[in-house]
Amino acid sequence: MTLKNWCAVLAISAGAVTSAMAQSSLAPSPNAKQDAPRLVEVMSMAQLQHLKLWYAGKAKNWDLAAYELRQLTNSLAEAAIFYPSIPISNVTTMKEPLLSVADAIAAGDDRKFAVSMRGLTDGCNACHSSMGRGFIAIGVPNGGQPPANQIFSPSGNGRKK
Ligand code: HEC
């Protein structure tokens, strides 16, 4: 295919994507329109919190894990509040897995933590699939590099302990 043809194909598919998104009615609630973060901003934050939560738990830094879990829970709540077109049942089904991660953190149980994190991640993907976003597939990190600018071990900042 020539470069010119390729550009034409790209332009057409970009147009199709835009109209598909326009039809998806993922508009912020009218009350919140002015200040609402874009849903992808809330979700990108959730992605980072989910990642940090995993590494904190893996490092058995339960204080940090509890903190990240709270942030993540807030992000999901924010998504539901600002974007009422997200089916509420998709949000409420996250409650059980979130509680299960909280239990594992409270117990300092790393095996339970790993299992509950997989359950939570299934919840992320279930909502994405049901909203025509099945291509956004979340997993628990599999040996990858964590955000390299944060120290995850409990004594990370050298001041604690
Ligand atoms: C209740 C529904 C729901 C849940 C639960 C949910 N998401 Fe999302 N997520 C969405 C929707 C809808 C979009 C697409 C937003 C758009 O296209 O404007 C999205 C998009 C995303 C994106 C794409 C953002 C980007 O710009 O790349 C990421 C990453 C993401 N979600 C992560 C997560 C993670 C991690 C979890 C679980 C901790 C999660 N989501 C749970 C509904 C959900």
Image: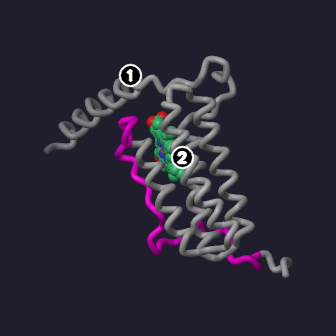
Task: Report if residue 90 lies within the magenta region.
Answer: no
Q: Which mark is residue 35?
A: none
Residue 5 position within the rendered picture, expressed as x and y whole percent measured from the top left: 18, 37
Residue 152 position within the rendered picture, expressed as x and y whole percent measured from the top left: 67, 73
Q: Dot 2: few (<14), some (14–19), or many (≥20) neighbours within 10 Å?
A: many
Name the residue rendered at 55%, 44% in the picture. Answer: 43
In the drawing, does residue 125 fall left or right of residue 3? right
Q: State which quarter of the image contains the N terminus.
A: top left
Q: Nearer the viewer, residue 97 or 132?
A: 97
Give the spatial CA distance, label 1 vs label 2.
Answer: 26 Å
For badge 1, the amino acid type reads Gln
Residue at which label 2 appears: 94
Which contiguous range is marked in magenta? Answer: 129-156
Residue 55 position within the rendered picture, expressed as x and y whole percent measured from the top left: 59, 69
**For numbered disc 1, what is the local secondary structure?**
helix
Residue at disc 2, CB closer than 8 Å to ligand 1: yes
